[in-house]
Amino acid sequence: MATLNDIARSVGVSATTVSRVLSGDPALRVSEATRSRIVAVAKQLNYRRPVERRAARLGTVAILQWYDEGTEASDLYYREIRDACEEALTAANYTIRRHFAASQISVGPDIVGIIAIGKYSRSQLAQLKATRQPVVVIDQDTLAQDLTCVLPDFATAVRLILKAFAQMGHTRLGFLAGQETTTDQTPLLDPRTRAFQAEQAVAGRYDPALVATGNFTIDSGYAAMSQAITKLGTDLPHAYFVANDLMAVGAIKALREHHLAIPQRVAVIGFNDAIIGRYITPQLTTVRVPTKQMGTEAVRLLLTRLQQPHAVAEKLTFATQLIQRETTPGLTRLA
């Protein structure tokens, strides 16, 4: 979208002069040739003043964030998704209305579409569907509820993690799972937990005694790993998959306090590639999720549904990437 600075550079005047000409300032003294040139360039670049852009907005899209604002600030995974959605919606000329941590799904009559970020209960998904507005859900598989969704390929990501551990010689694995609860207090089984249990069970290696559970926070990761160390003692596994990076940070703190060397005694792989993982010691090996692309594609799907209200629901899954850092020994390329 063209700016005042773009026009000013083209004409060779200041952005202030461009603004005053386009707003029809009668006190401005400028030659008629310059005035005409500014107007012509503005038209050529399809420039619109802010008031015109606001008037031309195509409608209001509700963004539902299952976290409250404080929790979102401490777990940037969902913040990055929301930021990408808002950037794409603004570029498409839609107004945005945010809703944080609402247990009941309710949007105004002026809303033309909904993007729901996070995890929702069956009751909440039914409420979303009952709005009769185009809906896209991000980070939850809602295709069975006939709602379009965008999410990482959790199952393939977990298989990649298990393959990486196997390459290190680790098949007896510990797992720090995360318990998810929706805003209406419905517990959900995390897809990473489901995938880990399934893969290890098929291989005949699943041992519930090696699983501890937190709630995706640093403190809960610290508590879960501390519990595992106390419970298992010298029988503690030599490798742990942790359901997200915040829990992994807490787990690493517990391991270091118990003088368990990382990765020599315990290798650790997290999930999400949160920025904090790059600034702890040792740096965290993790799975990178393309949060920006997920948000951008969710908006694309929503805009398609605004044009085609009766389009069938679809599911878009994104590949992830294992990022090798210091909490695992060197890995060769994994396919």
Image (cartoon, helix red, strand yellow):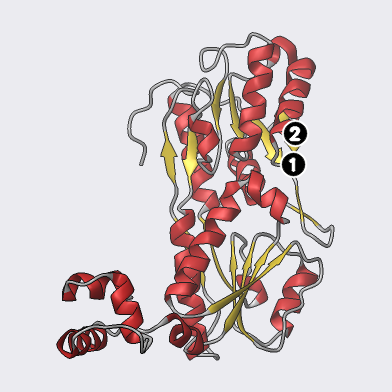
247 left or right, relative to 7: right
| Number of dots carrying numbers | 2
Q: Residue 76 placed where, x, y %?
A: 58, 48
Q: Residue 80 placed where, x, y %?
A: 53, 54
Could you say which quadrant of the image residue 259 lies in?
A: top right
Position above or below: 124 against 311: above
In the picture, the quarter occupied by the C terminus is top left
In the picture, the quarter occupied by the N terminus is bottom left
Could you say which quadrant of the image residue 260 lies in?
A: top right
- 76 or 116, which lies in front? 76
Q: Secondary structure at mark 1?
A: loop
Q: Residues within 10 Å of mark 2 (few under 14, many from 20)?
A: many
Q: Residue 123 placed where, x, y %?
A: 80, 71
> What amino acid type should be assigned to the residue bearing mark 2?
Ser
Q: Is residue 190 among what the camera can see? A: no
> What amino acid type should be assigned to the residue bearing mark 1?
Asn
Position above or below: 253 against 69: above
- Residue drawn 36% across the image and 89% down it: 26
* Residue bearing the label numbered 2: 220
- Residue drawn 46% across the image and 80% down it: 93
- Residue drawn 47% across the image and 85% down it: 51
Dots 2, 1 in contact, CB < 8 A: yes
Determine the CA span between mark 2 and mark 1: 6 Å
Q: What residue occupies the far right of the structure in this picture?
A: 185
Position above or below: 213 against 294: above
33 left or right, relative to 29: left
Disc number at residue 288? none
Between discs 2 and 1, the one toward the N terminus: 1
- 223 or 318, which lies in front? 223
- Residue drawn 78% across the image and 66% down it: 102
* Residue bearing the label numbered 1: 215
Q: Is residue 185 among what the camera can see? A: yes
